[in-house]
Image (cartoon, rainbow, N blue to C red):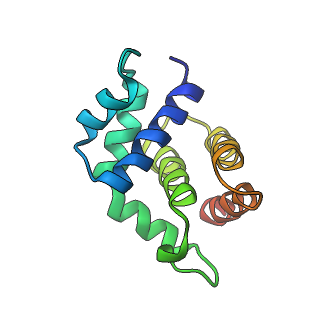
Amino acid sequence: MNRHSAREKAFQVLFQLGINDNNPDKAVEEHLETAEIDAFLMSLVKGVTENKAALDDVISMNLENWTIDRIASVEKTILRIAILEINYIDDIPTNVSINEAVELANMYGDEKSGKFVNGVLSKIIA
């Protein structure tokens, strides 16, 4: 599984976890069924799950005229993945993490999601 696909699967699993509050390992197994479980995918799911409070703090500190509670689950999940990559995974260039996050936001969010995610992430790396 390439990293782009792993990110998308991680987003789907983490989004479900936000709704169901399942065990991360179980959620990955249920979501992927027959697909192979990828190490990068697992590092994203576990990283976001284990660092959720710290990731949410970073998001909160970089919002203007918003609170984290007002952010839709799609954008919040995408931001958590991107911030995890930027702050915790050394071998991914920051611009790749941002581009992937914006792409996921455009795919799964509404017409403003990509712009919102890009704006928050740009403020974080500034």
Q: Position of residue 4 (x, y in %)?
A: 59, 28
Left/right of residue 57 with respect to residue 91 in the rendered view: left
- Residue 40 location, quadrant: top left
The residue under the point 42% across, 70% down is 57
Among the 4 quarters of the image, the one containing residue 96 = top right
Quadrant of residue 29 within the rendered picture: top left
Q: Residue 110 location, x and y as percent?
A: 71, 57
Residue at left offset 48%, top offset 54%: 80
Q: Is residue 74 left or right of residue 19?
A: right
- Identify the residue shown where x is 66% and y is 66%: 123
Residue at 49%, 47% (x, y): give it.
81
Between 65 and 84, the one lying in front of the other is 65
Give the side of residue 104 with respect to residue 34, left or right. right
- Image quadrant holding the C terminus, namely bottom right
Q: Residue furthest bottom?
A: 65
Q: Nearer the viewer, residue 82 or 124?
A: 82
